[in-house]
Structure formats: C-alpha cells, structure tokens
Image (tube, rainbow, N blue to C red):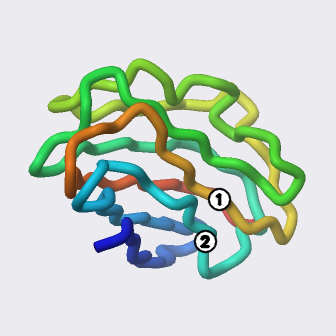
C-alpha cells in the first residue's frame, strides 16, 4: 500500500492546530508529500514531530514547505529521533503565512509502514 496521511484541524480561540498523521509505504518506507487541507493564515509558533509505531528510521527528516517551497522549519527537521518527540520553535517572531497551504515531505525513512505525526500550531490573524 502506498504512503498515506490524514489531517485533523482544530481551533481554540485564535490558535489553529493542524495535525498530519502519516504512514509510510508498506513496501519501501517512502512517503509521498502531503498538502494541508486548509490554508494557514497566521504565524507558525511551534511544530511538534512525534514518531509512531512502527518507528521511522533513526535520523529521518521532514520539511514543511509553504506555497513558495520555503521550508518553514528552516532546516530544523533533520536528524530526527526514531523514538523521541521533537519540538521546533521556528524563531521568536514565528513564521508568518498568509493563505498558504503547507506541504509535508518525509525523507530518509526505510521502515515499512512507519508512522508518526506532525503538529503545527499557528496564531491566526
């Protein structure tokens, strides 16, 4: 079976929580990039990356790109733990996005059907 992802979006006040739940391909561990099902219109404050079970390959990497192809993680989504969650705080001001869809890409994984989630917190305008 090919890779897949589902998304959950919730809002609490002016905070948007966008969650990608992903599963790698069952035959080679690859992942086809997934695009968010809603546009983000605000400032990305934090990103959590949580490996699941089965765990991805140690030192796997993710990018989270805006509509212009810029990685909003600024390269911080590399060398990720296969078992421990990682929190990324982009910068003190956050990363402003205006009506931008986000594309999740995962590389460096070779574990068949590996799973995980990427959670984005944005303060909406």
Q: Is residue 15 left or right of residue 29?
A: right
Could you give the CA–CA distance between mark 1 and mark 2, rounded to whole angstroms? Answer: 6 Å
Up-down: is 71 above or below 123? above
Residue 96 point in image, percent of width and height: 81, 49
The quadrant of the picture occupied by the N terminus is: bottom left
Q: Which residue is mark 2?
A: 36
27 to the left or right of 67: left
State the quadrant of the C terminus: bottom right
Verify CB contact (< 8 Å) between mark 1 and mark 2. Answer: yes
Q: Earlier in the sequence, mark 1 or mark 2?
A: 2
Mark 1: secondary structure: strand
Position above or below: 68 against 15? above
Relative placement, left or right, of 104 versus 48 is: right
Total tally of numbered discs in the picture: 2
Residue 35 picture quarter: bottom right
In this view of the protein, which residue sits in the foreground, 109 or 71?
109
Q: Residue at x 60, y 71 (%)?
A: 36
Q: Which residue is mark 1?
A: 103
Q: Say which quarter of the image contains residue 110.
A: top left
On the image, the x and y values in percent for residue 23 come to 29, 62
Query: Helix or strand or loop: what does disc 2 sit on?
Result: loop
Q: Position of residue 119 (x, y in %)?
A: 43, 55
Q: Is residue 119 left or right of residue 75?
A: left
Q: Give the percent coordinates (x, y) of residue 88.
A: 49, 31
Q: Residues within 10 Å of mark 2 (few under 14, many from 20)?
A: some
Q: Which mark is residue 41?
A: none
Residue beneath the point at 46% across and 32% down: 61
Residue at x 82%, y 48% (from the top left corner): 69
Question: Looking at the image, which residue sits at the far front?
Answer: 27
Label 1 crowding class (10 Å Cα cut-off): few <14, some 14-19, many 20+? some
26 in relation to 107, above or below: below
């Amino acid at each position: 079976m090919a890779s897949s992802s589902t998304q959950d979006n919730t809002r609490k006040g002016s905070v948007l929580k966008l969650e990608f739940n992903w599963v790698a391909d069952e035959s080679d561990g690859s992942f086809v990039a997934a695009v968010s099902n809603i546009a983000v219109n605000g400032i990305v404050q934090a990103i959590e990356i949580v490996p699941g079970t089965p765990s991805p390959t140690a030192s796997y990497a993710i990018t989270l790109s805006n509509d212009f192809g810029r990685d909003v993680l600024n390269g911080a989504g590399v060398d990720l733990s296969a078992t421990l969650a990682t929190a990324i705080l982009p910068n003190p001001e956050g990363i402003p996005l205006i009506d931008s869809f986000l594309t999740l890409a995962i590389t460096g994984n070779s574990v068949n059907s590996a799973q995980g989630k990427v959670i984005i917190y944005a303060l909406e305008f």
